[in-house]
Amino acid sequence: MTTTVQPGTGTPADEPQIIKQSKPGTGTGSATWPVRVGLLILCIAWMVPALGMLVNSFRPRDEQFASGWWTAFFNPFGSSWTIQNYSNVLTSDAAGIPMAQSFVNSLIVALPATVIPILIAAFAAYAFTFMQWKGRDVVFIVIVALLVVPNQVAFVPLVKLYSGLGLNGTFIAVWLAHIGFGMPLAVYILRSYMSGLPTAVIESAKIDGASHFTTFWRLIMPMSTPALASFAIFQFLWVWNDLLVALIFLGRGDNTVATVALQGLQGQTGAGKELIPAAGYVTIIVPIIVFLALQRYFIRGMTSGAVKG
């Protein structure tokens, strides 16, 4: 007896379908090209001024005033390059104190003005998120509403208040000012982030008899590291780059910070204008270090606070 094997009569519909998924960012649609071109234009517009400052920071005074920075690319080997500008910046005392001392003063201002708001705002955010008390939402709305109030509105009252207390020209005055100005944003970011934390962990801590203080320090603070780092970056950069608050509440003298010293480099007649590009790059070293140290937390902290808040 002979057995005959018939060929399969299945239709293509009976066969398993293989769906290919494209990797993110590999789309070939025409809609992605305008976005890429737009981002490229924004990057160029952002980088060109920084590139110009970098080039001019290595050019002597005469060449800076004689031609634009871009001319250095036409004849790079024929241009006079120098690091004297950086040397002059680091040894200059045009603001009344050495530039190095103004850097130390900036750190003295920036570190407490960053750490103190974080601690206070973290306590406040915990209270707004995990504690029930009358008027909680109203107080939070009032604090967030302060974000739209310009800081300049408070300058005159603060100057009068600090003058009566004898604080003008001291680090305490500028600390208090920056703490007050940064507090609304800190409370908003941290409260938004904490509202997305798992409540089961908090309830378990309460069942185990943990107090609010223990829960805050041992659970909430470690879990909120991304949000804390995000605000730390914002606040440190704001305080470090601030000129107006430092000029009003500290002024010039032994407590001069780097931004005020940077302004004083060019003098009344612009005699030291060639030092400004080099000084600008010297002053951004510390902010870059801070950002690179905390950047791994930055995106996670900001996106979590924005989505879960």
Image: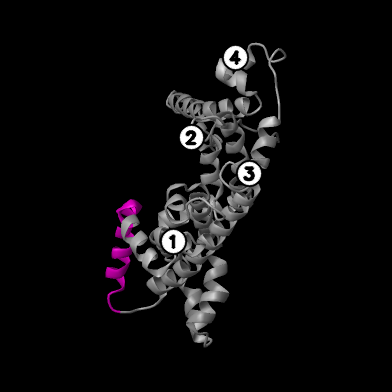
**Mark sitting earlier along the chain (4/1):** 4
- Give SS at disc 2: loop
The percent coordinates of residue 263 (x first, y second) are 51, 40
Residue 8 visible within the image: no
Instruction: Examine the image and state in which quarter residue 2 appears.
Output: top right
Category of crowding for the residue at label 4, using alpha-carbon neighbours closer than 10 angstroms: few (below 14), some (14–19), many (at least 20)? few
Numbered circle sitting on residue 285:
3
Contact? badges 2 and 3 (CB < 8 Å): no
Label 4 vs label 1, nearer the camera: 1
Contact? badges 4 and 1 (CB < 8 Å): no
**Mark sitting earlier along the chain (1/3):** 1
Q: Residue at x 49, y 62 (%)?
A: 170
**Mark sitting earlier along the chain (2/3):** 2
- Residue bearing the label numbered 1: 168
- Residue bearing the label numbered 4: 71
Q: Amino acid at mark 3?
A: Ile
Q: Residue at x 58, y 28 (%)?
A: 274
The percent coordinates of residue 87 (x first, y second) are 70, 36
**Cα separation between marks 4 and 2:** 28 Å
Q: Amino acid at mark 2?
A: Gln
- Residue bearing the label numbered 2: 268
Q: Amino acid at mark 1?
A: Asn
